[in-house]
Image (cartoon, rainbow, N blue to C red):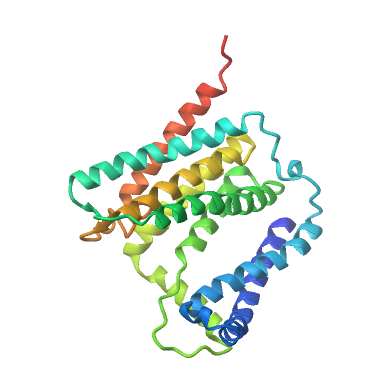
Amino acid sequence: MKDAAKLFAYFFAVVLGGGLLAPPLFWSAHRFSTFFAKYDFESFFHRALLICALAFLWPLLRSLRLHSFRDLQLDKNRHALRDVVAGILLAAIPLLVGFVVLIATRIFLLKNAIPGSSLGAALVASIVVPLIEELFFRGLLLGILLRGLRPVVGMLITSAFFAIIHFLKAPPRTGESVTWFSGFHSIANSFAQFADPMMMLASFTTLFLIGWILADARLRTRSLFLPIGLHAGWIFVAGVVGKMTKRETIILPWLGPNLLTGLLPLALGLITWALMIGWLRYANRPHS
């Protein structure tokens, strides 16, 4: 439990530091160059959180006395490439099937033109985001929790935190001036979304399931390569679909603003989970 207490102290320090750092970061950037004028305060708030997360990470690791990946219950994976490719396919195929159904039923409509830069951005995101988030959530966070808690409790905490972080998004500001308290207003406005039960059902539940599947993949393989592949597959297909299509309506709680929000994506996630378990049983079975 001491490790868990240190983790929560770390998260509290990151949020508090981000709230304090965001305003001067915003003011400094806008004074430095007009290039930053197109970015709103929330962009700087998220960057401030990232800066604090990196700045406080080294003291956390020192206090936990972590020396290698084995301290986080991670082993060397002899099938790293296989697991990454399998993860991408296991995540992408159900989403693509769902995409075809949504096009056929005209819930999604194809756009006339698709900028090549948009597809490139989706590809970059599908590489960078899984690496960062899996190292942090399923590597560091879950690994630390596993040192003092049962696996199911560690998975529960990690998946809930993963969902909360992705679910929180402050509403856009409309002409509001930035003060020293603006960062804390962003935090408060983010949590206000929990008052909407429909959004909770559509977004939080699906994000929690995604976090749980990724944590389960990590525990079953004692490696991050399968979770990275799954995460990459989801992000790439959802990103490409978002660039290729336009929506006529949002049908909550069945489908939110993207392919990763709502009860339909929840069902597709369950299919991916079942396929992953079946594939791992086949891949780990002795073959003559």
In this rendered view, identify the residue nearer to me: 45 or 197: 45
In this rendered view, identify the residue nearer to me: 150 or 115: 115
Say which residue appears at 80% left-offset and 60% top-offset.
63
From the viewer's perspective, is 104 left or right of 187?
A: left
Quarter of the image where the C terminus is located: top right
Which percent across, then down, holds residue 238?
39, 50
Residue 184, compared with residue 128, is above or below; it is below
From the viewer's perspective, is 26 left or right of 266?
A: right
In this rendered view, identify the residue nearer to me: 129 or 272: 129
Say which residue appears at 32% left-offset and 60% top-offset.
257
From the viewer's perspective, is 20 left or right of 258?
A: right
Residue 152, compared with residue 52, is above or below; it is above
Say which residue appears at 78% left-offset and 45% top-offset.
68
Residue 203, compared with residue 224, is above or below; it is below
Which percent across, then down, holds residue 283?
54, 23
Residue 90, compared with residue 181, is above or below; it is above
Which percent across, then down, holds residue 227?
55, 42
**Residue at the outermost left position:** 105
Say which residue appears at 35% left-offset and 48% top-offset.
265
Which percent across, then down, holds residue 56?
72, 67
Q: Is residue 13 something that shows in the picture?
A: yes
Quarter of the image where the N terminus is located: bottom right
